[in-house]
Image: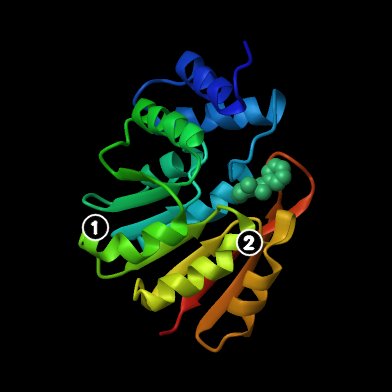
């Protein structure tokens, strides 16, 4: 019977990573996806850039769009200060089911809330559902053509405050040209590009960090 790539990643984590050790889960997935089969985790190189921004911002309330297998959710959660929360959103129920188990194996489930469904449906409900005022940090890593509409929706729903930071993966490969043009061209954002590579490859990619100015 055919297993899915996320199922194979979970099996690797359960057989190779130390339960309760977030770093070993991250390293196990990187090792597997670099040497066995590529998968669309943010990866070790761009992950280090993401880590530095999470450590700098120390977000109380963080949102991730695009959970996939939970690699970046585990990476981020392991760096969050006490009583901080990562809300991670996944559209694909197969991915979400795997991510829940990877997050549990890493022992970070008390810092992570995984919600399933389309971002366009969830974003307008988040303030009420989670008693939020705004997000300190948002990691965009879902469908690349959703980056711009979802950013505009977060603005409209008052989920961004002066100083909120957007971190976007894959702005070069696969690319999010309309999003890049928006955050780089808008007077309401201060944007900076961190050059890197597509996870586990030598193809150019990068992360765009954009501060919302209100
Ligand atoms: O879109 C793809 C993609 C496109 C085609 C084939 C495989 C993946 C992708 C590639 C690298 C990423 O880091 C990533 O987050 C994504 N994604 O789907 O969100
Ligand atoms: Mg990505």
Disc 1 versus disc 2: distance between alpha carbons? 25 Å
> Where does label 2 land, which residue?
145
Q: Secondary structure at mark 1?
A: helix
How crowded pointer 1 is (Cα within 10 Å; few <14, some 14-19, many 20+) is rated as few
Asked whether 35 or 2 is in front, the reply is 2
In the rendered image of this protein, does residue 134 appear above or below residue 199?
below
Q: Which mark is residue 32?
A: none
Q: Residue at x 20, y 62 (%)?
A: 131
Quadrant of the rendered structure where residue 159 is?
Answer: bottom left
Q: Residue at x 73, y 55 (%)?
A: 173
Q: Residue at x 40, y 85 (%)?
A: 214
In the rendered image of this protein, does residue 196 appear above or below residue 101?
below
Does residue 53 appear anywhere in the picture?
Answer: no
How crowded pointer 2 is (Cα within 10 Å; few <14, some 14-19, many 20+) is rated as few
In the rendered image of this protein, does residue 99 appear above or below residue 88?
above
Count of numbered marks: 2
Q: Secondary structure at mark 2?
A: helix
Q: Which mark is residue 129?
A: 1
Q: Residue at x 56, y 29 (%)?
A: 29
Asked whether 177 or 198 is in front, the reply is 177
Q: Are marks 1 and 2 in contact (CB under 8 Å)?
A: no
Classify the position of the N terminus by image quarter.
top right
Of label 1 and label 2, which has the lower sequence position? Answer: 1
Q: Position of residue 31 (x, y in %)?
A: 62, 27
Q: Position of residue 211 (x, y in %)?
A: 48, 75
Most distant residue in the right direction: 203
Q: Position of residue 171 (x, y in %)?
A: 67, 61
Does residue 11 appear anywhere in the picture?
Answer: yes
Q: Position of residue 51 (x, y in %)?
A: 48, 52
């Amino acid at each position: 019977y055919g297993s899915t790539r996320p199922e194979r990643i979970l099996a690797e984590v359960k057989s190779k990573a130390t339960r309760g050790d977030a770093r070993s889960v991250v390293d196990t997935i990187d090792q597997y996806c670099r040497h066995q089969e590529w998968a669309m985790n943010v990866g070790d190189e761009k992950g280090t850039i993401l880590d530095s921004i999470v450590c700098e911002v120390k977000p109380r309330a963080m949102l991730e769009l695009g959970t996939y297998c939970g690699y970046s959710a585990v990476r981020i959660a392991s760096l969050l200060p006490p009583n901080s929360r990562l809300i991670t959103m996944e559209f694909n129920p197969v991915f979400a089911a795997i991510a829940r188990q990877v997050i549990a194996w890493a022992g970070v489930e008390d810092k992570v809330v995984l919600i399933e469904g389309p971002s366009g449906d969830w974003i307008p409900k988040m303030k009420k559902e989670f008693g939020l005022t705004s997000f300190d940090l948002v990691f965009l890593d879902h469908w690349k053509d959703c980056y711009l509409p979802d950013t505009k929706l977060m603005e409209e729903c008052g989920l961004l405050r002066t100083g909120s930071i957007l971190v976007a993966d894959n702005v070069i490969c696969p690319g999010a040209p309309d999003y890049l043009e928006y955050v780089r061209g808008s007077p309401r954002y201060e944007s900076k590009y961190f050059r890197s590579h597509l996870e586990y490859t030598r193809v150019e990619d990068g992360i765009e960090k954009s501060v919302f100015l209100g």
